[in-house]
Amino acid sequence: MRPILFHLPFGLPIYGYGAMLCLAVIVGRLLAVRLAERDGMDGGLMSRCCVWILVSAFVGARLLCVVTEPDQFDRAIDVFKWWKGGVVAYGGFLGGLLGTAVFCRIHGVRLLAVADCAVPSLCLGLMLTRIGCLLAGCCFGQPWEGPWAVRFPAGSPAFEQQALQGLLPAGATESLPVHPTQVYEALVGLALLSVVMAVRRRQKFPGQALVAFFLGYAALRYAIEVVRADAGRGAIGPFSTSQLIALVTLPSAAMLFYVLWRHHQQVLTSDTRILAQEGVAGAAR
């Protein structure tokens, strides 16, 4: 854990999470533009779309945080204090998708084609920002004595929560060992990046990479939530907010894949029929 990486002149702190978020934005934008140009799209248009994605993703991530953790916002103005209360990753993904849809509608470009170029950047962003979470000490896991468990120092979110729960002995200077859930999610981002890039190389129809991301993330995020312990992430009954969203996302993404696959098959059948008819007509001449 290292919430502040270093200080600039005049004592200005550079926060670990903020640094990783900035890195994710810069590298993610470059990657999305490069992939768009490789697919024959306008790189400048994709670059502008990235701005829409970034803004809408932040708004979505912030709004979901407000919904799941309303007790952290005493006044309406606190919603705009982004450093208070944090953000929620799932809200960012959904908000970014909505922002992309609006941008594509305005500029008359295909949503699925743009989304397939942007999805690898989402994976990269997930990996980098979760490293930021590890530096900040947030999004921690349940107590665990496993071989790769981590401890957080006094004053960290994990330490404070365990102290309130009476889990720590008097005079403790660090938390109980916990699951490094931040590392788990960073590895999920890396794994999904490999998957969606592989899907892109063998892509049969637009939207495949997008579907692969949401299917993979929904399943893996649900599993990781089982060992998450930070109480502030919100819960409804036995499920965390992210688990409930995953339960909706998983069948929705599966249905989207089926619809896109059926449409692709119909297009192939139609093209085959047209070619056959043209062949018959040519033979008749």
Image (spheres, helix red, strand yellow):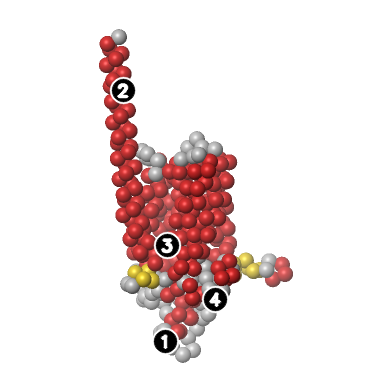
Which residue in the structure is indicated by mark 2? 275
Instruction: Kindly indicate the quadrant of the structure image that contains residue 151.
Output: bottom left
Residue 168 pos. (x, y %): 43, 85
**Secondary structure category for the residue under label 1:** loop
Is 143 displayed left or right of 81 in the figure?
A: left
Is 129 displayed left or right of 229 in the figure?
A: right
**Secondary structure category for the residue under label 3:** helix
- Looking at the image, which residue is at 53% across and 73% down? 73
Which circle's residue, 2 or 1, is located before the other in the chain? 1
User: In this picture, is 224 found above or below 268?
Assistant: below
Mark nearer the viewer, 2 or 1: 2
Determine the CA span between mark 1 and mark 3.
Answer: 28 Å
Which residue in the structure is indicated by mark 1? 166
Mark nearer the viewer, 4 or 2: 4
Q: How many neighbours does mark 2 have within 10 angstroms: few (below 14), some (14-19), or many (20 or more)?
A: few
Q: Amino acid at mark 4?
A: Asp
Is 269 displayed left or right of 31 in the figure?
A: left
Residue 261 pos. (x, y %): 31, 41
Determine the CA span between mark 3 and mark 4.
Answer: 30 Å
Which residue in the structure is indicated by mark 3? 185
Mark nearer the viewer, 1 or 4: 4
Determine the CA span between mark 2 and mark 1.
Answer: 74 Å
The reply to whether discs 2 and 3 touch (Cβ–Cβ < 8 Å) is no
Which circle's residue, 4 or 2, is located before the other in the chain? 4
Determine the CA span between mark 1 and mark 4.
Answer: 27 Å
Residue 38 or residue 45, whichever sits in front = 45
Q: How many neighbours does mark 4 have within 10 angstroms: few (below 14), some (14-19), or many (20 or more)?
A: few
Mark nearer the viewer, 3 or 4: 4
Which circle's residue, 2 or 3, is located before the other in the chain? 3
Asked whether residue 184 is in view, the answer is yes
Instruction: Kindly indicate the quadrant of the structure image that contains residue 263.
Output: top left
Rendered image: mark on residue 74: 4
